[in-house]
Structures are given as structure tokens and as C-alpha cells.
Amino acid sequence: MFATSGFKKLEKGEEKMEKKNIDWSNLGFGYVKTDKRYVSTFKDGAWDQGQLIEDDMITMSECAGVLQYAQTVFEGLKAYTTEDGHIVCFRPDLNAERLAQSAARLEMPVFPEDRFVDAVVQTVKANAGYVPPYGSGATLYIRPYMFGINPVIGVKPADEYQFRIFTTPVGPYFKGGAKPITIKVSDFDRAAPHGTGHIKAGLNYAMSLHAIVTAHKEGYDENLYLDPATRTKVEETGGANFIFVTKDNTVVVPKSPSILPSITRRSLVYVASEYLGLKVEEREVLFSEVKDFAEAGLCGTAAVISPIGKIVDHGKEIALPSGMESMGPVTKKLYDTLTGIQMGRIEAPEGWIRVIE
């Protein structure tokens, strides 16, 4: 059922880029400038061949389309060092596909998916010294993004674009690791019906900033957004999808046309069904059901899974039976299995792991 990982033992004397002198165990989730970044420009109806450059600065017109009308989309993925010393990426083809879908929705030229994957490989190879060592808990975060760069004053799509990738070594997204978090039901909507909630556009994240700052000021770690049409169904947070576990160990993930199609969530659904033999339901989840779940978590590239211990709905607390001390047992199995696949400890399904070096 599962393909071999495709890893081979490093040959004796095989050259590897020397690791940078970084305190890997104390990295936060922030930006650290690395040596090289990838850039390709779309002009006169075509993408150029692209190249790796050292300059981390971008020069553009004050009237650039991205500055005036937020015409920008992006992706997020990671490179890891596996148990046997290889540097790998996790399912970059799905990031390529999702960026293409996002670009098309914002009337931007699609960057070819095969070139996207190749650009990721080139960029990670050029910054291999920044890929944290196995066992450090840190990873190399990869940020592909695209934006309109030529002057645009009337409301219309830009004519010229840049596709870029930079990398930065990061520690865990949520400080304190897997300790359960407390979230609140937001009074704000993340997306509009028939809007852009299903794509990874910068404007979606800008619109969630006020809500997350408000939640933090009130002492919460994140928001739970309800569906914008009826405000009765669970959607997602500003940067992660939800995953729930029932008392009979069924994995439930919310389904909605305005939810971003998380690659981590899709992978966890497969792991739950095919590796752990669990029943999985992808369906609309009424907020009224949440009190009956045994476990809950947030899933995404940055955090993988962050367990939820408590959900607060305007003063009414829903305490998950899994508690505030650690992940619930099913969530923990899902987390351990997926991270085991990513780190090369567990055999991966065919095509999931892209070996870079």
C-alpha cells in the first residue's frame, strides 16, 4: 500500500553543506535572512527562466499593484532533516497546485507547477546550511509568493508579476510546543460567502489581524471563526484548520467552500484512515456539536497540530475532555504518525516526500 521512502544512505565522503552556527533549540517562529532566494518575473505575457539571487531587498514603484490593491498570493511549506540525514520537503506538488488556484482566482498568471517544485528544490539546496538538524525540533520554513509589481492606479490586474521564494529556519509556531491552547469564538468573519476564503491570498490574512490581536489582548491563543452566512458552523482559525475527534474515536474535519484546503489537514485525513484505521468524516460541523467532541486541534504547516483544551463562547466555556495538560490520545497518534512520515521514521505514501539531498 505504501511506497518506500526513496531515501538512500549517504555515501562516505559525500559533501554536505556545513550547518550554520545557530542555536537551533531556541529558534522562535520569526524571520532569519538566509543566503539565497529565488525570483522569476512575468513580463510581456511570459515568465522568465528564473534565478537564485543574494539580494533580499525588492525595489518597486510606489504605485505597484500589490501596494495599491493587495494582489498577492503565497504558500508555506517546510524542509526537514530526516533521521538518516537527508533534507526533504513534504508534498510540494500540492503547494504548487494551490498557488496556481489562488493566482487564477486573483487574475494573476499561473506559475507552472513543475517549475514551482523545481524552484523550491533549488532554493532549499542553496540554503541547506540553514536546514536544522534532525531532533532539534526546528525546520526550514519555505515561503513562495507572487505579487503584481508594475504601476496600477485604476482597479485592474497588474501586467507584470514576480514569483519569489525565500527560506527561514524556525522553531515551533506555538510557543510551549504541544501544550493545549484556549481559543475564543470570534465576533468577526474570516471570509465572505462566495468570496476568497478558499485561496491563500494575503488579503485574507490582513483581514484576520484585528481579530487575532483582539483575541490575544483578551488572553486567548486563537479565534474560532463561524461560517459567515449563518454563524452556526465551524470554519477555521486565521491560519489553521480544525480537526475534531468524537468519543468513539471518529476523526471529524469541517467542510465548507470558504475554508482554505489545508495540505496538512488532507494528509491527516489520509493518515487517520489508511495508517491508523480510524473512521473519518469530512462534513459540515455545527458549533452546537463541539461540546460533545472528545478532542480538538488546529492543523497547518506551521504547527502541524496544536491541541485545543478549551473553547470560550462569549463567557461560556467548553472544556475538552482531553484536558489542558497534553494532546488527546488520538490527536497524539495523528501527530506522531504524520511527523514520523515527514522525518523519515515512518514509511511514506508514494509521492509525499521530495528528497532534496
Image (tube, helix red, strand yellow):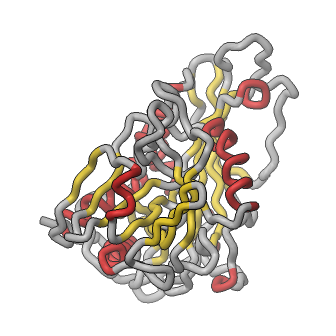
Q: Is any part of residue 277 visible from this angle? A: yes
Instruction: Say whether residue 307 is left or right of residue 124.
Output: left
Residue at image x 34%, y 48%? 285
Q: Is any part of residue 341 visible from this angle? A: no
**Residue lying farthest to the right in this orientation:** 62
Image coordinates of residue 12 in percent, x first then y, are: 42, 88
**Residue lying farthest to the left in this orientation:** 1
**Where on the picture, by quarter, is residue 11?**
bottom left
Residue at image x 53%, y 61%? 316
Instruction: Say whether residue 223 is left or right of residue 288.
Output: right
**Residue lying farthest to the front in this orientation:** 316
Image coordinates of residue 236 in percent, x first then y, are: 48, 50
Number of marks in the image? Answer: 0
Residue at image x 24%, y 66%? 272
**Which part of the image, by quadrant, shows the C terminus?**
bottom left
Question: Where 293 falls versus 208 (above or below)?
Answer: below
Image coordinates of residue 289 in percent, x first then y, are: 34, 55
Image coordinates of residue 30 in percent, x first then y, are: 71, 65
**Which part of the image, by quadrant, shows the N terminus?**
bottom left
Closer-to-camera residue (74/344): 74
Closer-to-camera residue (18/112): 112
Residue at image x 62%, y 41%? 188
Closer-to-camera residue (194/2): 194
Closer-to-camera residue (317/168): 317
**Where on the picture, by quarter, is residue 164?**
top right
